Amino acid sequence: MEFVFLWLTKLKFQVIGPPNAVFALVGEDVTLPASMSPALNAQGFDVRWTRNDFFKPVLLYQNSEIITKNQIEAYKGRTSLFTEELVNGNVSLRLQDVRVSDDGLYKCFVYSGQWEEDAHFTLNVEGLHLQHWIYTAEDQQTRLECSSEKWSSRPQVTWRDMNGVDVMSQSTLTVQRGNEGLLGVSSVIPIKWEFNVFSCLMRSNTTRPAYQSKMGIYGEYSEVTDSSSH
């Protein structure tokens, strides 16, 4: 009995994931990294990745093969494991062609036959943010517009002038949801100076860099002087 108890104890493990949310852009492939600690051979274990329904998995690995019978339809053909790495306890999920609907919470369950553990993962999905500038002068009022598309959540927007002064209070912000479910953001400020350089910073709540562009205004002439992310 003592021998059996020690053998079962050795099978205990944890499922370890990243400390922060995983970030992905729409259309790219992403990995939700998960590993067993200690690094047991998981080739003969059950590995189940789910969203909201335990019985409708994102991916199910059972009896040494991928089971697709009750798999969520939207994930068919887009999910896989690193099967050659199962021997090292790697139970990571590979997700192809990321969509807006993939954003959210995931759970990974690993069952050895005697012991089960799970871990939670968050996937943040964003579009590829391209900022556009529109410079208009009508009715003796000059306006500068900075717009960007494909945000999964509303970003924080900041305007600054050439001296670094925050002029966001002068701006008007418009947010609209497009056909893909992503947000388009537009911010407009009035321009009262003949010479100035303005920066528009859009920052999401994800771990990726903020997106910033600068526009120079020289009387009736304007140009984008810098476009960068940081």
Image (cartoon, rainbow, N blue to C red):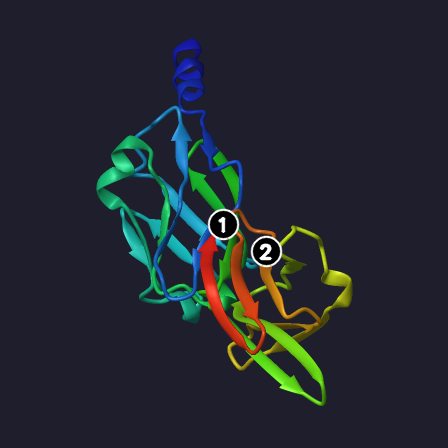
Q: Is residue 181 left or right of residue 62?
A: right
Residue under the image location 31 percent in, 66 percent down: 77
Q: Marks 1/2: CA distance?
A: 8 Å
Residue under the image location 44 percent in, 65 percent down: 128
Residue under the image location 26 percent in, 34 percent down: 87
Residue wearing tag 1: 208
Residue wearing tag 2: 204
Q: Position of residue 53 (x, y in %)?
A: 55, 59
Q: Is residue 137 left or right of residue 27?
A: right
The front one of 44 and 13 is: 13
Mark yes or no: residue 163 visible.
yes
- Is the residue 142 above or below the residue 29 in the image? below
The front one of 195 and 125 is: 195
Amino acid type indicated by mark 1: Arg
Amino acid type indicated by mark 2: Ser
Q: Position of residue 34 (x, y in %)?
A: 41, 39
- Is label 2 in a helix, a strand or a loop? loop
Q: Residues within 10 Å of mark 2 (few under 14, many from 20)?
A: some
